Every structure is written in C-alpha cells, then in structure tokens.
Amino acid sequence: MESAASGTPLFFFVSPEIGAVTSGSVSVRVNTRLSHFSISLSGTIMEMQAVNSMSYEQFIDVFGNVIEKFPLIAAAVWTKRPFPSVSALEQNFADFIDSLPRSGKEGILRCHPDLAGRDLLRGTLSLESQAEQNQAGLTILTAGQRSQLSELNAAYKNKFHFPFVICARMNDRESITHHLRSRIRNSSEQELQISIKEVLKICHLRLLDIIRPAVHSIKL
Ligand code: 2AL
C-alpha cells in the first residue's frame, strides 16, 4: 500500500481495539507510522460531506457523545454546519464549551464517569468510555490498585466537587495515578482549565473515531 502524498509505502497494523459504534458500524483505530486513521468495519468511512448532509437527529445520534453524556452541545453545534473539516467541527465543540459559564463547564465535568469507578464495575459506562478505560488498562486493575484509585478520586472530588477528568487513551494506570496525585494540589481555577482541556482531547479522539480527516485519507 502506498501513501498518495509521497508514494512511500505505509506500514500499518490494525489494532483490535474497538473505537465507537456509529450508525450501525463499528470503527477501529488503525495505527500507521505516520498517523492514526479510523476505518469502519462496515466499509463505509464517514466524510465531511456526509456529516454536513445529516439531519439534526442523525447528527445528535452520531456526535451526541463526543462530549460525554452531553448531547446538548452536538444539538447546538449542528446549527453551525457546513463544516469544512474535522478541525472546524471540533473547533465548534470547543467554542461552545468556552462560551459556557463556570457552572456549565463544571456540569460537563460532572457528567464524566470516574475512572475505574462505579459505572465500570456495574457495566454502565458509555461505549466510548468503556473502550477508553479499557485502553488505559483500567479494566484489569488489581483490587489494591482499584481501591487506591478510588481513594484518590474521592479525595479529588471532595476538594473540587467535580470528578477527576483525564484523556484515558493518552494515559495508562501509572500516569493517571501520577496526574491525580499532582493535580489534586492545584487550585480550583487551574483544575477547571486543565480538565476542560482533557475533555477536548477526549472529544478530538472521539471525532477521529467517527470521521476520516481529508488530509489523512488513504485508500484501503
Ligand atoms: C474519562 C472517560 O470516561 N474517558 C476518558 O478518556 N476519561 N473519564 C474521566 N473521569 O476522566
């Protein structure tokens, strides 16, 4: 297989990690030495053209959870179509969040499940969150590791009144514990800012699971 841009061979492997289920298709992350791509097992890869022609019902179905349990944002962002690119779409999610008062931003954080918390144990995580926590190794913790994380999460919530939020897919158990221990020492203002940045990282990866960025298009 060759990259259209350079003509150099692309060495890629398909990881078995399930990304998200959208419109009846399962998306899978593909890692190449150049970048990450998303393909759909159904063979259909969503393009911006398809995104821009969606009804608001379809748009909310597909993008309603790119911000965890907050479909209201997708419902508002739909108004801003057409989106020339994935980054333009992503920017609209970021702008909407940025425009919220502090209580709204905290509300977004409060809709995130704890890492390795009650929802994971009960099997009530969203598909996206389940895949992310799985990728970070949080589904295979020992009882001791789980209770350590649970105590840190509780201490964090006790101080800030919202849960500790971090992009799980960019971390693993050790780095999550490290960030928790370190961030708990921050001020509320610092934590709000850091946490919203993490929400945007989660959003970025979830969007890439759904849409193929034009600049990274490859023919499979
Ligand atoms: C999460 C989650 O559900 N996915 C992710 O990347 N981070 N939750 C959290 N509290 O950070």
Image (cartoon, rainbow, N blue to C red):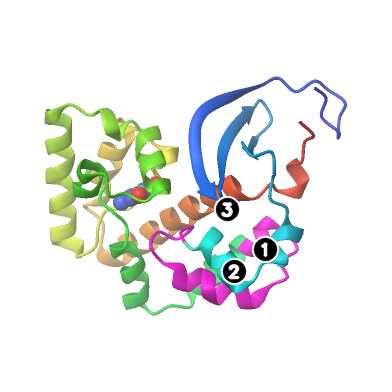
Residue 28 relative to residue 198: left or right: right
Mark 2 falls on what kind of element? helix
Q: Check the image and report above or below for 35 versus 22.
A: above
What span is colored magenta in the figure? 65-89
Looking at the rendered image, the quarter that the C terminus falls into is top right
* Crowd around label 2: few <14 · some 14–19 · many ≥20 (10 Å): many
> What residue appears at the point 55 percent right and 51 percent down from the top-left corner?
22
CB-based contact (under 8 Å), mark 2 and mark 1? yes
Q: Is mark 2 within 8 Å of ligand 1?
A: no
Label 3 vs 1, first from the N-terminus: 3
Quadrant for residue 81, please give it.
Answer: bottom right
Quadrant for residue 49, please give it.
Answer: bottom right
Residue 194 relative to residue 216: left or right: left
The residue carrying mark 1 is: 88
* Percent position of residue 177, x then y: 25, 38
The residue carrying mark 3 is: 23
> What residue appears at the point 64 percent right and 63 percent down from the top-left corner?
89
> What residue appears at the point 67 percent right and 67 percent down from the top-left corner?
54
Label 2 vs 3, first from the N-terminus: 3
Looking at the rendered image, the quarter that the N terminus falls into is top right
